[in-house]
Image: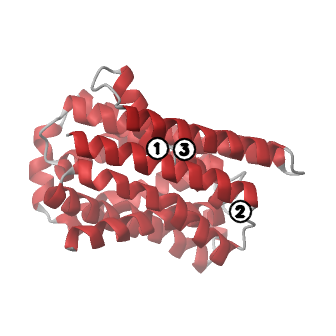
Amino acid sequence: MLAAVYLVLCHLLWATNNVAGRWLSSYLDPFTITAFRWLLAAPLYPLILGLGVVGRSRAYIGFRSLLLGLIGFTFFNYVLYASLSIAPAALVGLAYGFTPVAIIVISTVAGESRPSRAEVVGVTLSTVGVVILFAWRGVTLSGALDVVGILGGLLSSVLWAIYTVLQQRLYPDSDRAALTFASLTLSLPATLLISTPWLLKAPISSLDLKAVLAIVWIAAMPGAVAYYMWNKAVAIVGSQVAAPFSNLLPIFVAILGYLLLGERITLGDVAGGALIVAGSTIAMTARALKQ
């Protein structure tokens, strides 16, 4: 029961990252948001997960952890926030719902596993859902930017899938909390270096209190607290049971985008998003059952 609560709450918090990222895009560019998020989250992470994670993370210092950090923290966030700067959070969130399917596809290509018939059905349903999102948004007045946002959401899902599969391959029996902290801290200098041209131009002094609080929020809550909940839940029930809960994220993003940002959700969005979530749920449930 506790694990289920953690899994629901961590995905709700991750959904707020999408909504806050969309709102912050009127103040800051994607590179600056990413840099601020992880610069603040790095010291908060051990305070929330326990100071012991710092010592344990030393076992994961190396190029492999740096590679994971660059994919899962640096480039993933650049793409996600760039997508949110040009398209509604709900739309990007629905496209990001393709993540579980992307994990199955990439793990299959990497030779990690072979998909079952049910997984193929799930992948097919989710793919049809993505096609509907593209087709429906492509015929609206704002279709061009929406399509780019969908592409960005899909790319961010692929990056996260690569990060997930690579993490499992490189560190199959790892201390996930310690590995996450090592990956974050190792990739942080590169994140700051890449973001420097934008940080120098960022209107930091003109940010109002709401913008500052939004940055602190995405660093502390989705950036640290949610990871704590995810790691605790995985430690209780395992990653295979936890994985299907990721289908809650696009639903939460769509709801929060509508409530907090007043975003319009079309019939095509609902149809496409429902197929993406349904397909992902079928595929990930089938994978969990065959483990």
Of tags 1 and 2, which is closer to the observer? Answer: 1
Q: For this view, does 269 lie left or right of residue 227?
A: right
Mark 1 and mark 2 residues within 8 Å of each other at the beta carbon: no
Looking at the picture, the colour scheme in use is secondary structure
Look at mark 2 in the image and give the residue it sits on.
Answer: 26
Residue occupying the point 59% across, 71% down: 255
Return the x and y of residue 205 as percentages of the image width and height. 62, 68
Helix, strand or loop at label 2? It is loop
Look at mark 3 in the image and give the residue it sits on.
Answer: 78
Q: Earlier in the sequence, mark 1 or mark 2?
A: 2
Helix, strand or loop at label 1? It is helix
Look at mark 1 in the image and give the residue it sits on.
Answer: 99
Q: Is residue 234 visible?
A: yes
Mark number for residue 155?
Answer: none
Under mark 1, the amino acid is Thr
Residue 179 placement: quadrant:
top left
Return the x and y of residue 243 as percentages of the image width and height. 32, 51
Under mark 3, the amino acid is Tyr
Return the x and y of residue 94 as percentages of the image width and height. 59, 53
- Which one is nearer the viewer's eye here, 42 or 103? 103
Spatial CA distance of label 2 from label 3 is 16 Å
- Which one is nearer the viewer's eye here, 176 or 268? 268
Q: For this view, does 32 lie left or right of residue 261?
A: left
Return the x and y of residue 42 as percentages of the image width and height. 32, 57
Tell me: residue 190, above or below residue 246. above
Q: Is residue 201 visible?
A: no
Tell me: residue 148, above or below residue 92. above
Q: Quadrant of the C terminus?
A: top left
Under mark 2, the amino acid is Ser
Q: Dot 2 surroundings within 10 Å: few (below 14), some, or many (20 or more)?
A: few
